[in-house]
Image: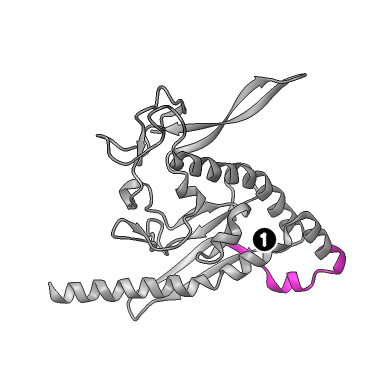
């Protein structure tokens, strides 16, 4: 169960975070949330889809990491095999919360950093990287996390507006993907949505200009471009299946 606390350089002066990778550290997922603020980085290495947001309707973007619910093909030997780490994982045990503070005329909700002390990345016995410097200042790691959290916070609002606009134009359509890795293994991906290329091509000039003016058109093309990474993910899955078969044959 999560144990959220407001991050404090006195209370958490000895807090350290394990930066290795593995299922036991919270990386065992085939699909992780993504935000438009990181699409430019994500699209170089990960397929980006949309899925229905079960909380309040609408959609949430997600980066595909594997073909099973608990399969992450980017983790190997405690390392991450891609150049960009999705923000949902890069933030580690930290998240944005809000505090009410008195402003000039009214109470204002101010974003603050919280830490989940029950998160598997919270290091024990002095291992991991320090969150605070000995004098109480932010470590380079925490400064990086703060940048990541800011991007996520900005991306949440941007995503709601972007996906609603795309849905209103009929651009968001269900995508079912059935794959065959070899004679004995395959996968079927359901519950995902993508951008309908034909509907996009059929938009008139005013609709395209509206998407461009709002800043959403670039994100649409980044999502479409990201789908080429599906081939790389399939190749990695096939490679691991061959390794598994060779290991079983040698046992």
Q: Which residue is mark 1?
A: 219
Q: Is residue 17 left or right of residue 102?
A: left
Q: Is residue 200 magenta?
A: yes
Residue lying at 41% horizontally and 54% vertically, measured from the top left: 29
Color theme of the render: one colour
Q: Nearer the viewer, residue 180 or 165?
A: 165
Observer able to see residue 60: no
Q: Is residue 212 above or below residue 157?
A: below
Task: Read off the magenta span.
Answer: 193-207
Q: Is residue 100 left or right of residue 233?
A: right
Element carrying mark 1:
helix
Q: Nearer the viewer, residue 116 or 192?
A: 116
Can you name the residue that lies furthest to the front here? Answer: 135
Residue lying at 63% horizontally and 47% vertically, measured from the top left: 155
Can you name the residue that lies furthest to the bottom here? Answer: 183
Q: Is residue 225 magenta?
A: no
Can you name the residue that lies furthest to the right here? Answer: 206
Q: Is residue 6 above or below residue 22?
A: above
């Amino acid at each position: 169960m999560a144990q959220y606390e407001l991050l404090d350089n006195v209370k958490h002066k000895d807090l350290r975070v394990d930066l290795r990778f593995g299922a036991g550290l919270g990386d065992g997922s085939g699909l992780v949330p993504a935000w438009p603020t990181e699409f430019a980085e994500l699209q170089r290495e990960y397929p980006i889809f949309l899925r229905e947001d079960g909380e309040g309707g609408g959609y949430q973007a997600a980066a595909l990491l594997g073909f099973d619910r608990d399969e992450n093909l980017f983790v190997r030997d405690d390392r991450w095999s891609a150049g960009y780490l999705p923000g949902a994982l890069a933030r580690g045990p930290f998240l944005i919360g809000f505090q009410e503070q008195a402003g000039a005329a009214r109470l204002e909700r101010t974003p603050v950093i919280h830490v989940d002390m029950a998160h598997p990345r919270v290091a024990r016995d002095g291992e991991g990287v320090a969150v605070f410097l000995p004098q109480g200042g932010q470590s380079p790691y925490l400064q990086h996390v703060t940048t990541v959290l800011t991007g996520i916070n900005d991306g949440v609002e941007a995503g709601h507006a972007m996906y609603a606009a795309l849905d209103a134009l009929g651009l968001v359509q269900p995508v079912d993907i059935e794959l065959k890795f070899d004679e004995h293994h395959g996968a079927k991906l359901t519950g995902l949505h993508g951008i309908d290329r034909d509907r996009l091509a059929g938009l008139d000039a005013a609709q395209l200009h509206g998407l461009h003016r709002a800043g959403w058109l670039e994100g649409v093309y980044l999502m479409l471009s990201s789908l080429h990474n599906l081939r790389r993910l399939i190749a990695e899955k096939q490679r691991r299946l061959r390794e598994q078969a060779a290991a079983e044959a040698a046992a």
